[in-house]
Amino acid sequence: MANEIKKIGILTSGGDAPGMNAAIRAVTRTALASGLEVIGINRGYAGLIEEDFIEMDAKSVSDIIQRGGTILYTARCKRFMTPEGQDQAAEVCRKHGIDGIVILGGDGSFRGASKLSERGINTIGVPCTIDLDISCTDYTIGFDTAVNTAMEAVDKVRDTSTSHERISIIEVMGRNAGYIALYCGIANGAEEILLPELNNYDERKMIDDILERKRVGKKHHIIINAEGIGNSYRMADRIEAATNIETRATIIGHIQRGGSPSARDRVMASAMGAYATDLLIEGKSNRVVCYRNGKFCDYDIEEALEMKKTLDPYMLSISGRFSR
Ligand code: ADP
Ligand code: F6P
């Protein structure tokens, strides 16, 4: 068996996501159970270059499955984007006898993983982002928690919005990806969902629709705006001026990235973390763990990065049906 692997590292990179800690726990405990040593690498690739390491034992990951954020901290590291930084990181791995690394992050982090793999360090990526915008997988760790956090916030805004018969623009995260907006739009029964992928923001039409809905007796107008579209505060000013209805903007912001992971995120993180570690133990490298069509699987990182993802057409088609 290709079990040359004796010591593995684990790092978290890019934007954090609820469930990363559950994945760290799964990787650590799976590896320990197979007799491997485990090194926690702090602050992503920056900590790898700087040898900012902690020894992980079973106790290091106790009491973290329910915690948001990442106990290993995360960072964006410019030096690692250069061949010199990548050479240095691979050299650090060799110096410490680290045979393989599980990398929790998004597409950028997987590009980095591929650079380490080219340099002889086995790498496995695990998709973690609240944005759900990693093409090779139907699920990314953190999405479910973020959507539930945003949904609860929108419900609260809706209460006061209805009481005052106002229009509310609620901005959710997702600069380039509208999944959180689309799911909240459906889950919160929003009148409008503004999505960066569609590029279909038509303020004149939205104002006409709002006036029409008011005419038929609607008491609130909830507009879910994905972060990538315009400035929600200025949009609110313009809509208020055009409709003569009080309009408020609320930006939910980073609370969507924190908080205790949902059951779905804990379970998916546990399964993906264990799967990633098993791949390393089998001697695999340059792979990313995915969940597709209800099954866990893995792809070559380059192949995974070439895949394209669009918003689910069925979800999009139903999302416009409920607003009258
Ligand atoms: P995410 O992993 O969430 O997509 P980023 O795109 O910010 O987040 O990437 C996280 C880190 O991964 C970067 O700060 C950098 O250290 C590393 N990285 C990103 N892209 C590359 C690349 N093309 N080559 C090498 N490393 C990269
Ligand atoms: O990728 C996750 C995400 O939260 C996006 O939705 C958002 O656009 C971005 O990260 C914000 O990143 P930060 O504030 O950490 O720079």
Image: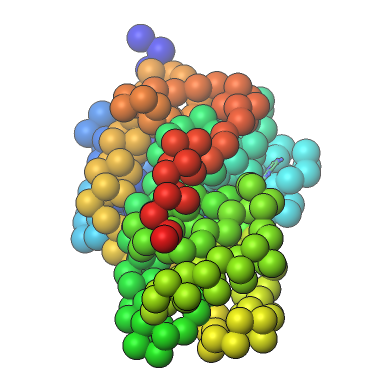
Q: What colour scheme does the image use?
A: rainbow
Say if residue 159 shows up in the picture: yes
Quick check: 180 left or right of 22? right
Give the x, y percent position of residue 181.
49, 57
Residue 121: quarter of image: top right
Say if residue 255 shows up in the picture: no
Quick check: 304 left or right of 31? right
Residue 275: quarter of image: top left
Decide: is 299 above or below 133: above
Where's the C terminus, which quadrant? bottom left
The residue positioned 55% from the left and 21% from the top of the image is 300
Residue 304 versus residue 6: which sits nearer the camera?
Answer: 304
**Number of marks present in the image shown:** 0
Give the x, y percent position of residue 179.
49, 50
Residue 241 versus residue 105: which sits nearer the camera?
Answer: 241
Residue 222 versus residue 260: which sits nearer the camera?
Answer: 222
Where's the N terminus, which quadrant? top left
The residue positioned 52% from the left and 59% from the top of the image is 193
Quick check: 38 left or right of 171? left
The residue positioned 43% from the left and 59% from the top of the image is 323
Q: Residue furthest front?
A: 215
Decide: is 197 above or below 203: above
The residue positioned 22% from the left and 51% from the top of the image is 263
Residue 135: quarter of image: top right
Give the x, y percent position of residue 282.
38, 18
Give the x, y percent position of residue 153.
37, 73
Residue 16 versus residue 247: which sits nearer the camera?
Answer: 247
Q: Residue furthest top?
A: 1
